[in-house]
Image (tube, rainbow, N blue to C red):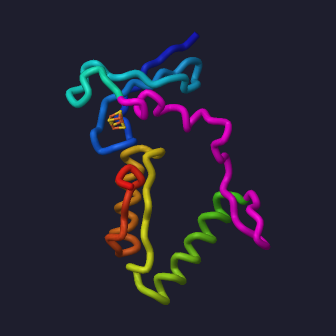
Amino acid sequence: MDYKMIPSVCSYCGTGCGVLFQVMDGKLTGTMPMKTHPVNEGKLCIKGWNLHEHVVSDKRLQTPLLKKDGQLQEATWDQAIQTTAGKLKAIIKDHGPDSVGVLASAKITNEENYLAQKFARAVIGTNNVDHCARL
Ligand code: SF4
């Protein structure tokens, strides 16, 4: 049995509690509070205790979906990215960069959220960026 505790930061809100992800034989199995973290000092709220659950949920989407003839159908990542990029370009060309917004997610890492806001500001050219933890 291979057991690891991987340090990270809870992404569900801006408090930034330290967590330890429990990984057993390469599979994420749980979340523990980081006792030595200066923000939470060994405590977590209920969202933090369940931080790993969306990763291991059997309801998690495993592949992109594109709507064709009114129905969602599985697509490749290349198809999904090309379709999204093409539609974003067309909207920005016709209506300007502030006609687009980026809504990030607590279910991605803090680093990915940083990239999402950078994409909004530096690539699209809009400050229309928000995060579900603020909703
Ligand atoms: S454990 Fe709770 S309070 Fe701490 S960052 Fe996560 S959601 Fe926020």
Q: Position of residue 29 (x, y in %)?
A: 55, 23
51 vs 81, nearest the viewer: 51
The C terminus: image quadrant: bottom left
Determine the residue positioned at 28% across, 18% down.
Answer: 35
Image height of 36 relative to 57, above or below: above
Q: Is residue 133 magenta?
A: no
The N terminus: image quadrant: top right
Image height of 46 relative to 4, above or below: below
Q: Position of residue 4 (x, y in %)?
A: 47, 18
Q: Residue furthest top?
A: 1
Q: Position of residue 25 (x, y in %)?
A: 59, 18
Does 61 sit left or right of 133 as displayed?
A: right
Does 89 sit left or right of 125 as displayed?
A: right
Determine the residue positioned at 39% across, 71% down.
Answer: 123
Find residue 16 and report its image quarter: top left
Find residue 100 and report its image quarter: bottom left
View quadrant of ligand 1? top left
Q: Is residue 66 magenta?
A: yes
Does 71 sit left or right of 36 as displayed?
A: right
Find residue 7 and report its image quarter: top left
Determine the residue positioned at 37% across, 47% down.
Answer: 111
Q: How many marks?
A: 0
Does 129 sit left or right of 61 as displayed?
A: left
Q: Residue furthest bottom?
A: 94
Q: Position of residue 89 (x, y in %)?
A: 51, 79
Span colored in magenta: 45-74
